[in-house]
Image: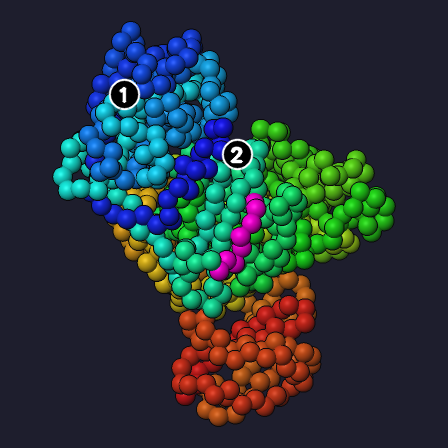
Amino acid sequence: MRFAFLSILFFSCTLGFTQGNWGSLVLPQDTFSYWVGPNNPNANWRLNNFNDNTWQKGVAGFGYGDGDDVTILPNAQSVFIRKSFQITSLDSIGDAIFHLDFDDGFVAFLNGVEISRENMASALPNANEFANNLREATMYQGGLPKEFFIGETTLKSILQNGKNTLAIQVHNYNATSSDLSCIPFFNIKLKSKGNPYHPTPSWFNPPKEFTKSHLPIVSINTNGQTIVDDPEIFADMKVWYNPLGDTNHINSSSFHYNGKIAIELRGESSLTFPKKSFKVETKDNLGNNLNFPLMGFPEENDWIFYGPYSDKSLIRNAVTFELYQSLEGYASKIQFFELVLNNSYEGIYLLMEKIKRDKNRVDIATLNPQDTIGEELTGGYIVRLDKIEPNGSPGFFSYPTPNFQNYGPNYFQFYDPKDEELNSIQKTYIQSYFQEAESALTNSNFFNPVTGYQKYIDIKSFIDYHIMNELTKNVDGYRFSTYFYKDKSDVIKAGPPWDFNLAYGNVDYWDEAYKTDGWIYPYPDRLWWTVRMLQDYSYLSQLHCRWKTLRLNEFSNENIETKIDSLVNYLGDATQRNFERWQILGNYVWPNKFIGNTHKEEINFVKNWMINRAEWMDMQWTIDCPQTSSIYYNQNIFEATVFPNPIEDAFTLNIDFSGSYELKISDVFGKIHHKENINLEKGANHLNPFNLASGIYFLQLKNEQGITKSIKIIKR
């Protein structure tokens, strides 16, 4: 009955809210009646006609430990509070918003009818029950309380003229928890002028109308269920997506997707944020996985809906993935959209592909249970370094022989296939392979290109991954969200990149991560492979030359600024809506070091931080490289020159290897002006100027082995 009714509660109004005159029926400074657990109150405590004269009296917040409590409840396992209020005219009210700042779980009732809950499993929890998840209060940190919208039709089916009662029970996560919080607000929209009730809090911002966007729009209806970390729940999802960039209208009956999903929360520290991120699986009506080309992505069923919150630039993950894709390594495709969850506008989100084995994601072979011998046993595997999850994150410690001095053993987790999908032979194989790779690294002859670590490790991918982690100064780099994969008859490759919301100086708990100088790879709590590989001059020189080549084009200051500006321009006025929903600009959100008063200030910080960081790296990676050549990856290195340069009409491209090449010409902003596959002969090749206007360009050649050479040219 609870879930059936709540589906009406959340969807009894049209999508799209209007601003108007609002008042408060319940505020923290009101006097509440309260009951402290762990003994249950009277079973009728939530009803409007319950007599609470024997209960204690106090004002909110109720709790302890957060510095936001007025009525102190030492070591309370739970607290039950009630507040009655008067409605002078039911006809004069519209929608309502219930706000609550709480720690850790709660259920709220209006005249005995449930209106919202979070982190509580039982329909009517007993006083000695614990919340099923942790949640930190936010207002004492400068944040806002959690918001729950109630439509006018539903509200009027619950309220009555005269006396009404808001009743809330709040529960702790465990008996030894250091805090508990309960700070309630109940605000209603008024249809007439004037306000016979309390003024709304100073932070309260009436919800604005949201009916259309140039971004895709996603609307999710959980049918009254609470989205939790685990297990996933079955829900309905509608998506409006016009691939040609036309405006999306939330009231349109033309859907890109209109069907079922499974959804659960994702993240760790981000679970404490009021703006949540989600794991989503597209499903058919029977609950089976449904591969779907969501927002133009290749067909799949596993998705991430990432909600940037502490990253107030909104773009840290997006710009990282786009930069990494320019290196021709796999990183999740991205698409910004706006989310409406249970009729509540939730702001800007980023659609990302979940990391998994797939021809359009990590393109490695499928490892089947019967693959236990020969080449079939050798791939494909994805493993990772990450935090240990509550289930223990099954995996293995690697103990190289000899050990690497001053560093402990690495713990690699089985990611895809999962632990339960691998048999003992497969687990033994991948564990042994990683241990052999580490032993090759620690061996005194580790730099030998035939018998050393290069026998097990793909230098190309590790150099690019190294550069990406250092350019962003990713605080979690080399230790968390760090992935590796291995295909059949292949070596270990680094990647894909993941979770860069704490990169680019967005950290206040470690000063080194905020600075634009200094490396992050050497710290002893991180993967030591990079430290060891840098002792190999071959790796070191290839790293330096790869960086210098990237700085000519993909990672030039101009290209970095262009990528950031293009993302900001694409977000457009959705940015304003996001920060009207989440009023965090100018306020501290963990773990911000820099706090901008505007989104533009946040963007400028990221842009300036990246350029300063890149220019510092220029001064560190200084090994001389053959002029205008790419000498990395120990593959077929080639030389090429342009004559004359500056060019006017036809010009000559001299090259020292015949073969098929991809030729690309781009300007200093990264815009591609010409691209073709071309067969070039050793020696002189006469080319036309490709209708280039006067200016500076980069001519890039890529051979069949993936080696890239970039030449700066000037067109008169």
| Percent coordinates x, y for residue 526 in the rendering | 55, 39
Residue found at the far right of this picture: 373
| Percent coordinates x, y for residue 372 in the rendering | 83, 43
Query: Dot 2 corresponds to which residue?
Result: 229
Asked if residue 550 is positioned above or below residue 521 in the image, the reply reads below
State whether the magenta stretch is mostly helix, strand or loop: strand
Is 541 inside the magenta-drawn segment?
A: no
Asked if residue 529 is positioned above or below residue 564 in the image, the reply reads above
Picture quadrant where residue 36 is located: top left
Which of the two discs, 1 and 2, labels the residue nearer the N terminus? 1
Query: Dot 1 corresponds to which residue?
Result: 83
| Percent coordinates x, y for residue 357 in the rendering | 67, 51
Q: 286 or 242, which lies in front? A: 286
Q: Quadrant of the C terminus?
A: bottom left
Please indicate whether residue 162 sits to the left or right of residue 66 in the image: left
**Residue 295's mark?**
none
Q: How is the image coloured?
A: rainbow
Q: Amino acid at mark 2?
A: Asp
CB under 8 Å between discs 1 and 2: no
Asked if residue 203 is positioned above or below residue 460 in the image, the reply reads above
Magenta span: 254-261
Q: Amino acid at mark 1?
A: Lys
Identify which residue is drawn at 53% across, 38% down: 264
Picture quadrant where residue 287 is located: top right
Identify which residue is drawn at 68% across, 66% down: 635
